[in-house]
Image (spheres, helix red, strand yellow):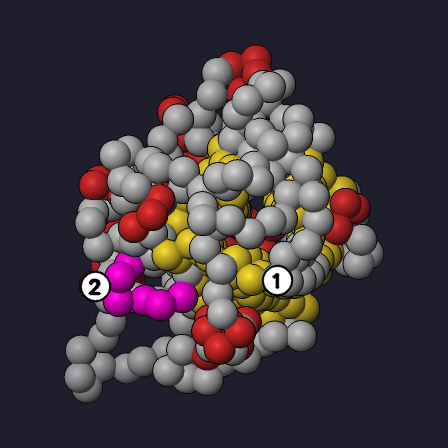
Amino acid sequence: MTPTVTRQRPWWVAAAAAVAALVPTAGSAVAAPPSVAATIVVAADGSGNYRTVQAAVDSVPSNNTAAVTISIKKGTYTGLVRVPANKPHITFAGATGTASDVVLSESRPASQYGTDGSATVLIAAPDTAVRDLTIRNAYDEAANGASQALALYANGDRQTYTNVRFLGNQDTLLTWTGSSGKVMRQYFYRCYVEGDVDFIYGSGTAVFDNSQIHSLSRGSTSNNGYITAASTYTNNPYGLLFVNSTFTSNAAAGTVYLGRPWHPSGDVNAVAQVLIRNSTLGAHIRTSQPWTDMSGFSWKDARFSEYQNTGPGATVNSNRPQLSSGQAASYLARDYLAGSDGWNPVR
């Protein structure tokens, strides 16, 4: 059940090329971009500006420079949401403030649609915020067979997610850079992420702060899955950070791995970096060896570590690398997210 990322050219690359072809030459007239309301209301019952979230996204001008809020009224909205790289500065906000009231949902397996095609929500734009809603891939793997089925594909820099629920099974949440030369940073605050196999994965830099990480039971008495499958590039010291968070499950005790190292297409330069610190680990976490190998790559060669965790799933032994207090001082949330521009969304 190894996750794969489809290597076909992403849709937004083609879109960007099409936009570039329309750029006027020197001396030609340049039209101002169309204006857009500061707040766009989406309501399934027709009481807003649009009935679908995608229609609201489509209404935002390309290369937008002003802050735009897409306020989504209570309801379940079935359909894909795609935010291209040339539409930054959008905030998606559930109108009620209760994440379960607003649900963005689709049911697509990667086995049929590819990795990016399976994602209910794909956000390639930088400077995007999402709050107070649910993103779900409702694909039923018990009925239809195991497959990747992404809820979120995060492929943009400086993205924030606050009070958002991510629901799925395998590969629920992907944070992706696309190449070793890029850094994509995302901050998840007070979020809920659930799944079973590699359900938080990828090459991006992502911080999960004060969040709940919930492992679904696969009904096994020995192996109920893997939480992370990071593929952080070697030139990036910061991959996935979980801090002040809670790891929960209804799975049997000692049957869930914290993670395994994913090397996409066998890339030796994708060396996972995952730190779990100051968090509470439930009894479902394997205590003797919570990290494991993947596709012939040893977990011992990855950058896996813990620091001051508590709970029945937390312990210290030779199979659980721990940071020293000196090392931990350089692996705070702000260190993961600062980059070269000093970005600091940390609450």
Considering depth in this image, is 263 or 98 the residue closer to the camera? 263
Q: Nearer the viewer, mark 2 or mark 1?
A: 1
| Residue 308 disc label | 1
Quadrant in the picture for residue 221:
top right
- Name the N-terminal-most of marks 2 and 1: 2
Which amino acid, mark 1?
Gln
Considering depth in this image, is 246 or 72 the residue closer to the camera? 246
Residue 9 lies, in percent from the top left, at 24, 45
Instruction: Identify the residue position indicated by label 2 in the image.
Output: 21
Up-down: is 331 above or below 173?
A: below
Residue 347 lies, in percent from the top left, at 67, 75
**Residue interval drawn in magenta:** 233-238
Label 1's element? loop
Position of the N terminus by quadrant: top left
Label 2's element? helix
- Image point (48%, 39%), residue name: 289
Asked if the magenta segment contains residue 237, the reply would be yes
Magenta: main secondary structure: loop
Residue 185 lies, in percent from the top left, at 45, 66
Asked if the magenta segment contains residue 252, the reply would be no
Category of crowding for the residue at label 1, using alpha-carbon neighbours closer than 10 angstroms: few (below 14), some (14–19), many (at least 20) = some
Considering depth in this image, is 33 or 56 the residue closer to the camera? 56
